[in-house]
Amino acid sequence: MNTINGTKIKHLIEIIPRGTLILSSYLKDLGISNDLQQAYVKNGWLKRVDRGVFMFFSDEPTLEGALSCLSNQSNLEMHLGGLSALRLHGYHHFIQPDESSIVEYVYKPSQDRLPAWFNALNLQRNMEIVSTSFLSGGLGLESRKHRDFTYPIATAERAILEYLFLCPERGSLKVAYQMLEMMVGLRPDSLQALLEHCSSVKVKRLFLYMAEKLGHAWFDHLDVTRFDLGQGKRVIEPNGVYDSKYGISLRDVENV
């Protein structure tokens, strides 16, 4: 390997954290051609994980590393959200107590196609991909440290809305209420922005109904008049009790 190509691999080692994936398109942006990529594989610097995706030879793919790669090397906005983010934020008392049953919820915009290589990875994690655009991309996201890199996750404010989006079909309203009861420190400015840009009437009505019922101090700082709560009634659960203020029907409204 000549000096120029040796310099390129040294630069790659310096800028790519161990444990993340490396896209072929990103390597090309760094001046590393397809032929040179193959040379790095042949010489044991890189290994091919899937078509167009590499890692350093001694690394193994992880969900966090894949999300970090997509965040930094592509235009695809995918993040850990919902229950998974709430667990990382410490609201785990009611979430999947059996470690073997934990499902990681990965959210992506509905219009974006999931890369084929993402599904091909052997991550040894139970995952559910949620494709939705009910919240603006990038709003309410933050970077979380993992090993030597960061990856995107939902803030607590966004994560509880993402969980409510799945309720009651793929989530529990009781669990949502119990978690929200613990969330005394949510930031009203963040909630205000998220709810103003939220397109799901169901999510907004459920969240405001539960938050007001719980009487959190931050609720009083929300300007509810700026939220589009839609028109008409919403049947969240059949045979429920109707709440006239928020126009939703829930079962056992006093013991959500």
Image (spheres, rainbow, N blue to C red):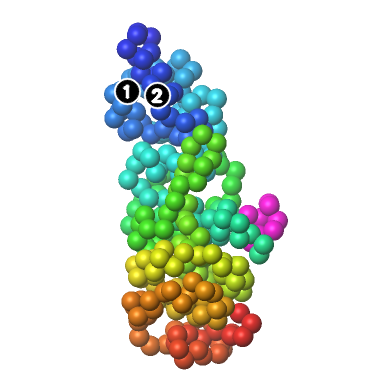
| Residue visible at 55% across and 78% down in the picture | 215
Q: Is residue 154 visible?
A: yes
Magenta stretch prevailing secondary structure: loop
Q: Residue furthest top?
A: 2
Q: Does label 1 or label 2 sit earlier along the sequence?
A: 2
Q: Residues within 10 Å of mark 1 (few under 14, many from 20)?
A: some
Residue 206 screen position, x and y as percent: 48, 77
Magenta segment: does it hold 101? Answer: yes
Check the image and name the residue furthest to the right: 98
Q: Amino acid at mark 2?
A: Leu
Name the one closer to the observer, 181 or 232: 181
Of residues 76 and 197, the one drawn nearer to the viewer in this rendering: 197
Instruction: Report x, y in % for residue 106.
Output: 48, 53
Image quadrant assignment for residue 230: bottom left
Identify whether 82 is placed above or below 117: below
Foreground tag (1 vs 2): 2
Residue 188 lies in what quarter of the image? Answer: bottom left
Rendered location of residue 242, percent (x, y): 51, 90
- 222 relative position to 90: left or right: left
Amino acid type assigned to the residue bearing label 1 in the image: Ile
Residue at position x 69%, y 58% in the image: 97
Mark 1 falls on what kind of element?
loop
Task: Kindly identify the residue that appears in the image at 55 percent across and 25 percent down.
Answer: 58
Q: Quadrant of residue 26?
A: top left
Q: Name which residue lies at 38% across and 40% down.
A: 72
Residue bearing the label numbered 1: 32
Task: Look at the image and tell me whether residue 172 can be seen.
Answer: no
In whole angstroms, how far apart are the C-alphas of marks 1 and 2?
10 Å
